[in-house]
Amino acid sequence: MENRLHGLIPEAWYPRALQQSPDWLWFVDQDGEEPLGVAPADNAGARLSGRVYAADLPELEDACVELVRDGRAFTLDFRVVLRSGRLLWLEGKGYPLEDGHAVIAARDITAFKQQEERLSRLAYYDALTGLPNRRLFQDRFMQALYMAKRYHHKLAVLYLDMDDFKQVNDSFGHAAGDELLILAASRLSHSIREPDTVCRLGGDEFVLLLQQFEIKEDILKIGRRIGDALSQPFDIGGRGIRISSSIGASFYPDDGKDLDTLLKCADAAMYASKQRGKNRLELFSEP
C-alpha cells in the first residue's frame, strides 16, 4: 500500500506539503550555498543566511562549514527574522548527506525561550522593582572581583537603608510603600554608572557594587548624588512624600576580600550613619 501511494504522489506536492509544516528545512551544498530552502508558508523560499539574526549568524556559519567539510553534525539554537519583522527562536539540527551536501532541519522554540527568560527573571531579579536580586548581585560581584584581582582595581560596596520607611507604610498603606520602592529603585538605577550594579536585598534595603574609580572621594560623590536623588519628593497618589537614606560603604581590598565581609562592613557603616543622624554616607572604619 505504501509503495502504491508513493507512486501516485506527484513530486511537486512534496515542497507544497513541506511549506505547510511549522518546521524549517534547508539543504546546503558543498560550497556552502543553499539551493533549496523550505520554511513556513509566509517565509517560503527564504535563504538561511538571509533570515538569521545578525548576532547569531557567525556561529551558525562556522557550524555549517564543519558540517559540509567534515560531516560534523550539530545542534544549535539561533534566531531568525520573519518578513513581518518578528523574531523567532529556532532549534536547528544539521546532518551530513552524500557528496558534501547537508541538510538543516529546525523547529520553532520561541515559546520555550520565552518561558526560560521568565524563569530566569524570577531567579535573578526582584519581582517588585525589577532590580537584580542577591543571587545576581553575587554573580556580578564575583565577575568584578576576578577583574579587580587581575588588574589591581578597587571595588566599593554600598549598603543603603531608607530612613523611617515603616512610617510610610503605616501612614499611607503598603501599596504606597511598594510604589515608593519602585520609584526609589528607578532613581538608584539612574544615579550609578554603566559598570555598576544596584540590587534590592529585601524590604527597603539596597546594596550597590561600584567599580572603576580611583579614590574614595569618587565614591563619596556618588553617595551624595544618590542621597540627593532619594531626598527629592516622590509623587505617590497625588501626595508628595519625602524620605531620606542612610548609606554605608566598604572597600576592596582595604576592608575585605570577599562579598560577605564587605557586606558586613558596609552594613556596620550604614548603622553608624543612622546613629549619627541619618541621611548621610559613612565609610567603614574599625571600631
Image (cartoon, rainbow, N blue to C red):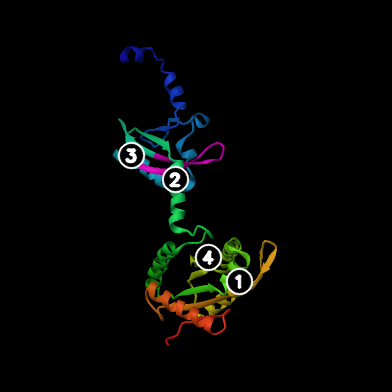
Q: Earlier in the sequence, mark 3 or mark 1?
A: 3
Q: Which residue is at 51% across, 61% downward?
A: 131
Label 2–label 1 contact, CB within 8 A? no
* Any part of residue 89 in sight: no
The residues bearing labels 1 and 4 have C-alpha atoms spaced at a distance of: 19 Å
The part of the image, by quadrant, that contains residue 98 is top left
Q: Main secondary structure of the magenta part?
A: strand
Label 3–label 2 contact, CB within 8 A? no
Q: Amino acid at mark 4?
A: Glu
Q: Is residue 113 left or right of residue 95?
A: right
The answer to whether 283 is drawn above or below residue 144 in the figure is below
**Span of residues in magenta:** 75-91
Q: Secondary structure at mark 1?
A: helix
Which of 175/283 is in front? 175
Q: Which residue is mark 1?
A: 230
Label 4–label 2 contact, CB within 8 A? no
In this view, the mark in front (2 or 1) = 1
Q: Amino acid at mark 3?
A: Leu
Q: Which residue is mark 3?
A: 67
In this view, the mark in front (3 or 4) = 4
The part of the image, by quadrant, that contains residue 85 is top right
Which of 67/80 is in front? 80
Which labelled disc corresponds to residue 194?
A: 4
Packing grade of label 3 (10 A; few <14, some 14-19, many >=20) is many
Specify the quadrant that holds the C terminus: bottom left
Q: Which residue is mark 2?
A: 113
Q: Amino acid at mark 1?
A: Leu
Residue 159 location (% of width, % of height) = 49, 74
The residues bearing labels 3 and 1 have C-alpha atoms spaced at a distance of: 57 Å
